[in-house]
Image (spheres, rainbow, N blue to C red):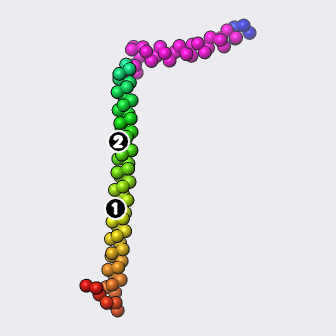
């Protein structure tokens, strides 16, 4: 029982020690120095902002295209109705 309690007491300390050694050890495979980490984070933020802007532009363009198509459909509908026999032509 004493061994188990000793293990339980030591476990939090070993869990805390591991992340620090990995993040500050340049010999780790995925190590990045702090300036590289900042640059990576800035690039990630910039890409996210650009993606958001592109999505907004695409939504606006899609809305504009829909409106133009609706106008064309309405104009064509009016034109075909005015050209039906028995109606006066406006042309």
Residue 1 in the image: above or below residue 60: above
Mark 1: secondary structure: helix
Q: Which residue is mark 1?
A: 65
Residue count near mark 2 (Cα–Cα under 10 Å), binned few <14, some 14–19, many ≥20: few
Residue 22 in the image: above or below residue 43: above
- The main secondary structure of the magenta stretch is helix
In magenta segment, residue 19: yes
Quadrant where the image shows the C terminus: bottom left
Residue bounds of the magenta highlight? 5-32
Quadrant where the image shows the N terminus: top right
| Residue positioned 33% across, 75% down in the render | 75
Q: Pick whichever of labels 2 and 1 is earlier in the sequence.
A: 2
> Which residue is farthest right?
1
Question: Marks 2 and 1: CB-CB under 8 Å?
Answer: no
The answer for how far apart the CA atoms under marks 2 and 1 are is 22 Å
Q: Which mark is residue 50?
A: 2
| Residue positioned 33% across, 76% down in the render | 76
Q: Position of residue 18 (x, y in %)?
A: 52, 15
Q: Position of residue 88 (x, y in %)?
A: 31, 90
Q: Position of residue 54 (x, y in %)?
A: 35, 47
């Amino acid at each position: 029982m004493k061994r188990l309690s000793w293990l339980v007491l030591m476990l939090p300390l070993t869990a805390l020690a591991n992340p620090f050694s990995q993040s500050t050890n340049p010999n780790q495979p995925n190590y990045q120095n702090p300036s590289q980490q900042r640059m990576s984070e800035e690039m990630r933020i910039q890409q996210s902002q650009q993606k958001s802007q592109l999505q907004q532009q695409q939504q606006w363009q899609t809305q504009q295209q829909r409106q133009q198509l609706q106008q064309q459909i309405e104009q064509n509908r009016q034109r075909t109705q005015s050209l039906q026999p028995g109606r006066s032509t406006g042309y």
